[in-house]
Image (cartoon, rainbow, N blue to C red):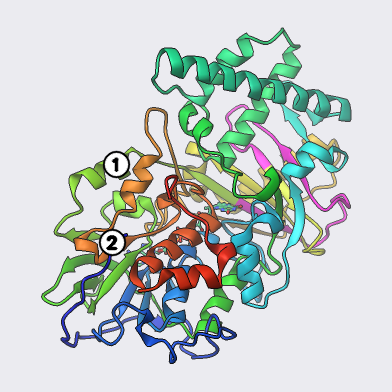
Amino acid sequence: MVLLNLFSLCHGKLSLTGSLYNSSHKKPFQNKSKVSKREDPELCETEGHHPHPIVIVGAGAAGLAAAAILIDVGCHVEVLEAQDKIGGRAFSFDTSSNFPGVDGGAHYVLGGKYNSIISSLLNILELPPMVEVGGDEVYFSKRSSLEMWMSTNSRKELLSNNEIDITFDIESMLQETLRVVWSEWSASVGTDISIAHGLKSAFARLPEFSAFTKATIAWHHYLKFNYSLGAEPALLSLRDFMDTNYTSFYKNGVANNAIIRGGMQVIWDALVEKTGMVVQTGFQVVEIREGPHGVIVRGADDSEIEASAVIVTVPLGVLLGNGIIFEPPIENLKFGNMSTLGIAHVATVILKYNDNSFLKDSSYHGMGYISSNEWLYYSNSVKEGYKSPAYETFYLTESAAREIKNVDHTVVSNKFEKILNEIHGTDAFYPADAIYVSDWNTNEFFNGTWSYVPVGANSSARDVYAEPAFEGRVMFAGEATCTTMPGTVHGAIASGFREALRIIKSPSRWHVRYPSMNIPCHHTL
Ligand SMILES: Cc1cc2nc3c(=O)[nH]c(=O)nc-3n(C[C@H](O)[C@H](O)[C@H](O)COP(=O)(O)OP(=O)(O)OC[C@H]3O[C@@H](n4cnc5c(N)ncnc54)[C@H](O)[C@@H]3O)c2cc1C
């Protein structure tokens, strides 16, 4: 653990631009805590020694989580956010707009109620419990409510229950064989291979299946890896997939999914509200440099804030694109490690229908589709929890994800209408009443969707990324820095907690207070 130096006592210039997201000072995060900040002010390392704030760059899950902890223990915190809204890659549409409570980015709480980070947060913030919607549990034990569509160039249709069963049985065999392939490969050759390479070798060891079955399995892998890990299997590291048990933190290996009532945004709004956090929106940080008495954070309009410490939570794509200049520069070793990580390109298209009569009554259904040019490949819709109107979410990957932003909305809507009717064999679908197309890949404040480990790279690069710079005064958080739970909301939150705990004097007290949120981001912790 790197401890901050005690900084000098000079007053810094505080010059703010943009607007405050929420300046109201209400109840603290842990308002029921027996340890209030007044009773125990020395909890914050810098409190009482230095008047400069701890600056958090980015108001996504990581930044807001870090800020909440620091405020909880009595630190002076400023959160700077480039956009005019908070939540980052887990923002939801405003309830007064076209898409009430619908998530633009992250949507599923992986593990559902077993996700102790999000469950505890909802509890502390006095928010209603999440809505369980299935996910892996539906896949593996309640298949009757799962709808799967299969697509090849010649066949686009719903799989029968028998075909679904066969698909999953073969999938299980394939996963086991993949493990054997990997252990033999790593013992004999020792290098990494791609997931696609591993799957091909595993398939070769299994008895022949029909062309349809093979195509179904191929579809399933595209769906699974392309969406859940963010890149096609040919780009993904098999070593990382085998080494990282992405669901280990969900107790008992159950990986049921859930959604937040009202969307992810209600968590961020409640965090700001309950802590009295000040978020400066419209403040794009362009430079972080060493100052005479602390760290200087410069905005795009040249205004500057002097900070005692800085936690940088912007996405990896922003840092690799030099969206923030560091002076002195981030050392080569660190930057080199960060550069080995991949950045996924996934885009979301959300269609809103005022009439939801075409949806089934099941609380969750998913379907997959690969068009010949891979224009789209996965969709799901949630009726339960949203009732009416209904939403269909489609995920696009790779080049389609980058290009979608330039396609006219009417064209997008018509294309999806055609595909849905083709698959369903009906004309029940009509052009959507409203449409949202995400811009994760073209927006300079994201430059991609989430991080992944490409073939040949190593997840330990995330740990190097997470090492502090500027002799411990500049810290890094965000999903890409969380080795155990990357690319997730809870991973981002855990990374924010991790960096906040570097700063405060007695992190163990926090661990005792919130044991269920104390999930390490680092394999060796
Ligand atoms: C389409 C999509 C679907 C997803 N689905 C899920 C899911 O179902 N479940 C799940 O757990 N996770 C999911 N994720 C991943 C999850 O959303 C992210 O891992 C998590 O939200 C990242 O949080 P963060 O704090 O690390 O980064 P962010 O949320 O990106 O926050 C960083 C913030 O920094 C701001 N910023 C950028 N540059 C600057 C600058 N120069 N100055 C100031 N501020 C700046 C950004 O505007 C942003 O608000 C999904 C992501 C996407 C995009």
Of tags 2 and 1, the one toward the viewer is 2
Q: Can you tell me whether the CB of the residue at mark 2 lies under 8 Å from the nearest atom of ligand 1?
A: no
Q: CA distance from mark 2 to mark 1?
A: 20 Å
Label 2–label 1 contact, CB within 8 A = no
Predominant SS along the magenta part: loop
Residue of label 1: 337
Q: Looking at this view, is 264 or 469 the one in front?
A: 469
Is residue 276 positioned above or below 315 on the image? below
Disc sitting over residue 2 in the figure: 2
At label 2, the amino acid type is Val
* Mark toward the start of the polypeptide (2 vs 1): 2
At label 1, the amino acid type is Asn
Residue 216 visible in this rendered orientation of the protein: no
Q: Position of residue 361 (x, y in %)?
A: 89, 52
Q: Position of residue 97 (x, y in %)?
A: 64, 72
- Residue stretch in magenta: 349-378
Q: Position of residue 362 (x, y in %)?
A: 86, 50
Image check: 405 left or right of 40?
A: right
Image check: 321 left or right of 410?
A: left
Q: Position of residue 160 (x, y in %)?
A: 87, 29
Q: Looking at this view, is 224 or 142 the one in front?
A: 142
